[in-house]
Amino acid sequence: MVDSDIWNEIVDLFHENQSKDERIIQNDWEKMVLRKYLGFDKSDIDSQRRLRIGSTDKKIDVMLKKNGEEFCVIELKQHSHSRNNGGQAQLFSYLNQLKKIRLGILVCDKLYVYAFDYKLDDCEQAFVEIPFEEDDKNGIAFVGFFQKQELDQDKIVDWVNEKHRERLEDERQREKEREIVEKIKSEITDDLIKNLLRHHFVNKFGCADSFFEQAYKEHIGMVPPPPNDFDFDDPPTPRQTTGLKVVLPKGQIIQEHKASETLCRAVRYTVDLYGSSKVLEVMRNNNIVCDKELLLKKGPHNHPKASSTPIGNGYYVNTHMNNDTKRDKLVRLGNALGLHWTVSVD
């Protein structure tokens, strides 16, 4: 298989193990990912390797070897856990104790590859964050770098450090953009907006201020209204809560019994509001996909693992993803459409 196919198999395995315990996850990573997909031998995988930290014996989930030499520590967590749920701290404690291993991998809700530098604080360690999504470029690169026959530690470290620098630069750029936005927001007032509009339209139409005032009064408060036939339920009781929730700017809540139903209802809301053509265009432009197809599709999705759910008028939504991914896709869709909704996973 080519690297992209292998990565997509790993993604499928991640989804299959979404609710499984760490024992099953470790077994699948050892047998499927490391041995079958990446080509390591059983002797290269030191499972539950003992490590003395202070007065306590710890067990490393997997110590990976090549030619008999240890080179990478792998920490495996349940896929509902984030890296800050203790997995990263545990991985770093092993790497700090070993003092010679430069590479670490953390498997949780995402895949993290670390280039560990003992001279740096934990918060400064370089890493690549890889979501378990099909055809992810960094996921495909991970497969290529960690193939046993092609493995070069120096190249992996260089790749992680390069991606880390790119991410830091992106974060700095976003901070600068945010600062500009905040400065503009601090100077925006209702009077400023009204006076700018007044100047524009009075000059454009050569009319008296009273015409603008009348038009402005009729326009005040107009935002894209909810579709006339879209019913918002009362806020759900704790018994009904599913974890995925969408809150619109005016406080209306979209939240169903299942997260997949919430996803479908939210997408249906955008279709009713903007039309299917606009929503599909936005999804294409922003690569909002699942299983290699747009999240929304006319007719059922083609991927054999797709959970293609009808939402009306012949359109289907693919719900084949975990709750965090559902949230991320709705956030991206809302941002692209300018909806200003809030999406959360409890």
Image (cartoon, rainbow, N blue to C red):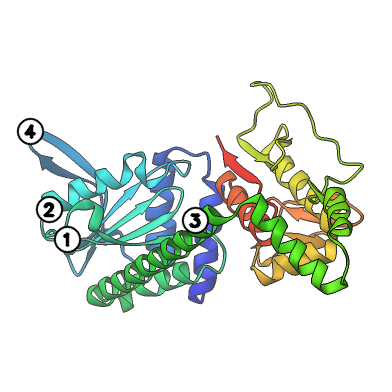
Q: Is residue 302 visible?
A: no
Residue type at the position of mark 2: Leu
Residue at the (84%, 53%) spot, across then down: 213
Q: Is mark 3 on a helix, strand or loop?
A: helix
Residue type at the position of mark 3: Glu
Residue pointed to by mark 3: 182
Which callout, 3 or 4, points at the residue further toward the start of the chain?
A: 4
Residue type at the position of mark 1: Ile
Residue farthest toward the left in the current orientation of the protein: 55
Q: Are marks 3 and 4 in contact (CB under 8 Å)?
A: no
Q: How many other residues sit within 10 Å of disc 1, few (<14), some (14-19) or many (≥20)? A: some
Q: Is mark 2 on a helix, strand or loop?
A: helix
Q: Distance between the residues labelled 4 and 1?
A: 21 Å
Can you tell which mark lies on residue 101? 1
Find residue 59 and report its horizontal and vertical position in percent.
22, 41
Q: Do the residues labelled 2 and 4 touch (CB within 8 Å)?
A: no
Find residue 159 and report its horizontal and vertical position in percent.
32, 74
Residue at the (69%, 43%) spot, across then down: 249
Which callout, 1 or 3, points at the residue further toward the start of the chain?
A: 1
Q: Distance between the residues labelled 2 and 4?
A: 15 Å
Res. 241 image quadrant: top right
Residue pointed to by mark 4: 55
Residue pointed to by mark 2: 98
Q: How far apart are marks 1 and 2 (CA)?
A: 6 Å
Q: Is mark 1 on a helix, strand or loop?
A: loop
Residue at the (48%, 58%) spot, across then down: 183
